[in-house]
Image (cartoon, helix red, strand yellow):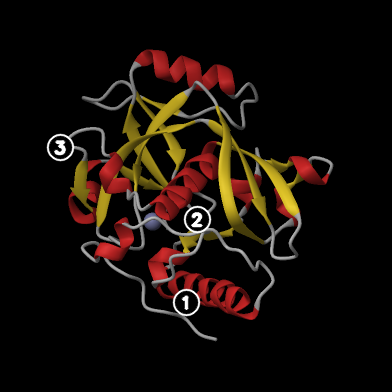
Amino acid sequence: MAERKILQLGVPLLWERSRDVADVKGASVRGVIQDLDDTLAWFRATTGWGRGISAPQIGELLRISFIHVDDVLSRESRLMSESETPLHSHERLVLINPEIVWRSKETFTLWDDCFSFPNLLVKVSRQEAIEVTYTDPRGKPQRLRAERGLSELLQHEIDHLEGILALDRRLNDHSVATREAFAQMEMTPHPSGATQVWKHQPEGAISQAASLNPSSARRPRLRISQNLRHLWTKYISRR
Ligand SMILES: [Zn+2]
C-alpha cells in the first residue's frame, strides 16, 4: 500500500455521495484504510499539517474517514461506547459509516481548509459539539462525543462522504481567501505547533464560547488589536 493522489477541487467525484461499507473487515476496505493512513502521513511529513482525510479524496466512494488524533483534538472529546475513554489513548480514529446523531445548538465560525484545495481557506459555521456513531475497523460499533476542534473536523470529513465540500458551506460569497491573502490578515503560530487563526466574532459569541469553556486553559484567548477589537482565537483544522 502507498500514499495516493489527493483529488483536487474541480474533480466531479468529490461532489458525489459515498456508499456504505458493507464488508468492514474485507481486504479491499483494509487496503483503503491503509492508503488513507499512508496518504495522511505523507501529507503531514511533506507539509507539516493535516489531521483528517476521507476516502473520496483518494478516489474511493466509500464512507470512511481517517483522523490523526493529536492532543488538541482529544482534549474535550471521548469515546462514549468505551466507558467514556478519552481520545488521547488513540493515535488514529478510523470511522466507517459514520453518522452524526446529535448536534449542539451552539455553533462557531472558523476558516476551514482542505487537502483538496490546500491554497484556499473558507469561512464556515460548525456545531460546537456533535455525537457520531460509526463502526471501527474491528467491526465494533462506536459512539463518539466530539467537541470543538474534533467536532468541526468530523463535520468536515463526514461532509466529504456526502459529497459536500467546505467551499459549498461558505457563509457568503466573500467567505473565501487564498492562503497567501489569509496569512496577511491575522495568523499567529500556536505553541503546540497547530495553527492558530484569529477570527472575527461578535461579542455574544465570545461570551458564549467562554461560558462553554469554564476552565481558563480552555477559554479562548482574547486579543485587542488596533482596529479589530473583538477577535478571539482557536486552533483550527489544517488538514
Ligand atoms: Zn477536506
Residue in view at x 21 percent, y 38 percent: 175
Q: Give the CA distance from mark 1 to mark 2.
A: 18 Å
The dot on residue 42 is: 1
Q: CB under 8 Å between callouts 1 and 2?
A: no
Instruction: Give the class, few, some or many, for how many residues have Cα within 10 Å of label 1's Cα (few <14, many ≥20).
Output: some
Left or right: 219 with respect to 187?
A: right
| Count of numbered circles in the view | 3
Q: Nearer the viewer, mark 1 or mark 3?
A: 3
- The residue that label 3 is drawn on is 173
Q: Quadrant of residue 84?
A: top right
Residue 65, image x and y in percent?
A: 53, 59
| Element class at badge 2 | loop
Q: Quadrant of residue 91?
A: bottom right
Question: Of marks 1 and 3, which one's residue comes earlier in the chain?
Answer: 1
From the viewer's side, name the closer residue of 66 and 98.
Answer: 98
Image point (32%, 47%), residue name: 166
Element marked by disc 1: helix
Q: Is residue 113 visible?
A: yes
| Amino acid type of the residue tagged 2 in the rendering | Gly
Q: Which element type, helix, strand or loop, lies under badge 3?
A: loop
- Image coordinates for residue 220, horizontal then vertical, percent: 50, 29
Q: Is 131 rendered above or below residue 238?
A: above
Q: Residue at x 69, y 65 (%)?
A: 137
The N terminus, quarter of image:
bottom right
Outermost residue, front side: 22
